[in-house]
Image: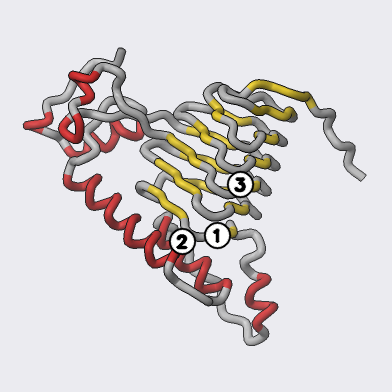
Amino acid sequence: MPQLEIDPSNLDLSENRARSLRGELYYAFAPDLTADRLRCKHACNRYNNAGEISRRRQVELWRDVISDPTALPPVKEDAAADEAQFDDDPWIEGPVRIDYGTNVKMGKNVYINFNCTILDTCLVTIGSRTLLAANVSIYAATHPLDPVLRNGTSGPELGKAITIGDDCFIGGSVVILPGVKIGNGITVGAGSVVTKDVPDLCVVAGNPARIMKRLDPVSEK
């Protein structure tokens, strides 16, 4: 069981943040982390409530959610040509809810359907060409099992990084728990709860998710 090694009455904010990223017990309601979550909440609200906007504006708002400072490419006069500049950027259907945004990393050509929740206490990595169906929840955050240590909002929390590989399809209403590593080319059946690592090239389903089928690699043509 995780042991409390920090004094909340004399909190070193820098070390507290570092502990959170290392997956150790930390205090989520420290003022800097609370401010970070509020920033991301407002950025998600702007993204979710943007209405009918261009692809350029969508990418701009998404980069604000994840605090990506990368400059957008110059505007092209032709609308289709301008939109094509963002083909490799993630396509995220709102509404989406994320804790921090800064701990979410995605590869190229990722698609996430609506009502996705990402609790990114620790790093959440989603590989290239991976598709998430509606209502997927990715939880890189958790709480101590000991109720005395847990102590509501006054107690510490912790998390573990989650990795989803390239070319995966995560079905609707899937839940992915802290510390899970999902390999490349995986399909996760709708409604599954993924509690353990998944090797490359297989289909998993169930609660907890289990391997249902192993796949042969598709030969390059």
Question: Of the residues under marks 3 and 1, which one precedes in the sequence?
Answer: 1
Q: Secondary structure at mark 3?
A: strand
Name which residue type carries label 1.
Glu
Question: Residue 66's image quarter?
Answer: bottom left
Q: Gap between marks 3 and 1, in whole Å?
A: 10 Å
Q: Residues within 10 Å of mark 3 (few under 14, many from 20)?
A: many
Q: Is residue 84 above or below residue 186?
A: below
Residue 146 visible in the shown view: yes
Name the quadrant of the N terminus.
top left
Q: Is residue 66 above or below residue 172?
A: below
Q: Nearer the viewer, residue 175 or 108?
A: 175
Q: Please name the residue shown 69% across and 78% down the image.
A: 80
The number of numbered badges drawn on the structure is 3
Residue at the spot of label 2? 63
Q: Secondary structure at mark 2?
A: helix
Name which residue type carries label 2.
Arg
Name the side, left or right, on which 64 lies relative to 19: right
Q: Are marks 3 and 1 in contact (CB under 8 Å)?
A: no
Q: Nearer the viewer, residue 102 or 135?
A: 135
Residue at the spot of label 1? 93
Q: Nearer the viewer, residue 128 or 187?
A: 187
Residue 15 visible in the shown view: no
Q: How is the image coloured?
A: secondary structure
Q: Are marks 2 and 1 in contact (CB under 8 Å)?
A: no
Q: Nearer the viewer, mark 3 or mark 2?
A: 3
Residue at the spot of label 3? 132
Name the side, left or right, on which 5 lies relative to 165: left
Q: Secondary structure at mark 1?
A: loop
